[in-house]
Amino acid sequence: MNPDQELKLEKKVLYVEDDTVNCLVMKGLLQRYSINVEIATTAHEAVLKAKRFLFPLILMDINLGEEETDGILLSRELRALPGYEACPIFAITAYPELHLTMGEERGIFQRYFYKPFNRDELAQAILGELSPS
């Protein structure tokens, strides 16, 4: 990050997902709950956006369709950025067995939501994270 650049705190979540339809569905769903969504369709785009804004929550697709990375590796990379060490990251995945097979990666994600997920449950979990303590 450029030292002259200020890191801005925004009240919106970062959704990392390579599928355009899933992006539109998530954005529409969360807008109904007055949750602003910033979309990143690649790992590179997610890192750039995370360096520019300090998101209070990240929604991470696990299978990003990229050979060089996936949502697990990208989450590790984002956690290394200033301000993201304790940022909640929710895994959004079509692989329900993921949390059972992650081993040392288990602590990366605070919640797992399996496609197709319960929309109200996801929105309430996000609202709970975004609410002031």
Image (cartoon, rainbow, N blue to C red):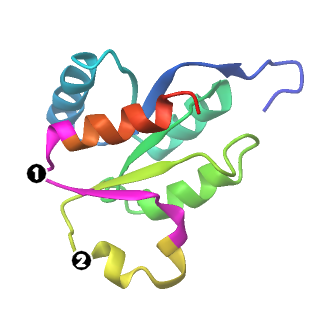
Q: Are marks 2 and 1 in contact (CB under 8 Å)?
A: no
Image quadrant containing the N terminus:
top right
Quarter where residue 122 is shown? top left
The residue identified by callout 1 is: 116
Q: Which percent across, then down, holds residue 82?
A: 76, 42
Q: Which percent across, then down, holds residue 117?
A: 15, 49
Q: Is residue 82 above or below residue 66?
A: above
The residue identified by callout 2 is: 97
Residue depicted at x 65% and y 24% = 52
Q: Which percent across, then down, holds residue 92?
A: 29, 52
Q: Secondary structure at mark 2?
A: loop
Whole-angstrom CA distance, mark 2 to mark 1, is 14 Å
Q: Secondary structure at mark 1?
A: loop
Total numbered circles? 2
Q: Which percent across, then down, holds residue 77?
A: 62, 55
Image quadrant containing the C terminus:
top right
Label located before the other in sequence (2 or 1): 2
